[in-house]
Image (cartoon, rainbow, N blue to C red):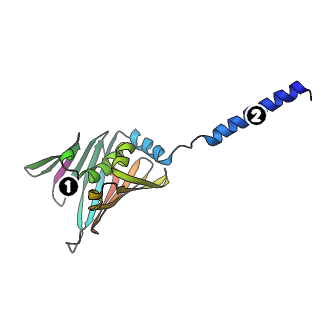
Amino acid sequence: MTTARARRAAAVLSLGLCALAGVAGAAAPDALDELMHALAARRHGHVSYTEVQHLAVLDQPLKSSGELLYDAPDRLEKRMLKPAPETLVLAHGVLSATRGKHTRVVELATAPQLAPLIESLRATLAGDRAALERIFSVQLEGDLARWTLRLTPRDRAAARTIAAVLITGERSDLRTVEILAADGDRSLLTLGAELPP
């Protein structure tokens, strides 16, 4: 092999090694980013739900059911149909609760104790990682096919109320939202079939 040919071969080999090193050194797609991207792609959802709340002060769990609607990025509506009609609507940072002829309105900015409960679901549906990580320490288990998010409140005051929020799903579909209260109470929201718009 001539000297010139040897230099060219060495240069080609060197470039190849550099390219391989670049590929090996490149960050793999972050699993949480991948999940957030899949969730953010869904702009609308309308599903049935059932909810079971286990409260220490009650002998029997409270059960309810209804419909949950979502429109990206921040409108969430929970229509409870059983045991009695009630509607909760979150839109642009304002939460309104309507039961019968009575409606109560609360701005989330003035009720920081509600933010972790509301944002855990809203930010997950929106694929809003920044919002989740602002309020929670976020742990992801599993992969895109079947995943669990464990959200632990960062704020000490919130942590005195909420121990964790566990959200499970498959790809861009949420399946369950479980809220574990610091006092041992818990609630489990199970999302069902997609409903017509």
In the rendered image of this protein, does residue 59 appear above or below residue 15? below
Give coordinates of residue 127: x percent, y percent: 38, 43
| Quarter of the image where one finds residue 196 | top left
Magenta region: 84-88
* Tags 2 and 1 touching, CB below 8 Å: no
Disc 2 element = helix
Disc 1 element = strand
Among all residues in the image, which is located at the extreme left? 101
Placement of the C terminus among the 4 image quadrants: top left
Numbered circle sitting on residue 14: 2
Among all residues in the image, which is located at the extreme front? 156
Q: Please give left or right for residue 11 compared with residue 108 in the image.
A: right
Q: Which residue is mark 1?
A: 81
Disc 2 residue crowd, few under 14, some 14–19, many 20+, Cα 10 Å: few
Q: Is residue 182 visible?
A: yes
Give coordinates of residue 191: x percent, y percent: 33, 55
Give coordinates of residue 65: x percent, y percent: 24, 58
The answer to which of 131 and 85 lies nearer the viewer is 131
Q: Please give left or right for residue 163 compared with residue 144 in the image.
A: left
Placement of the N terminus among the 4 image quadrants: top right
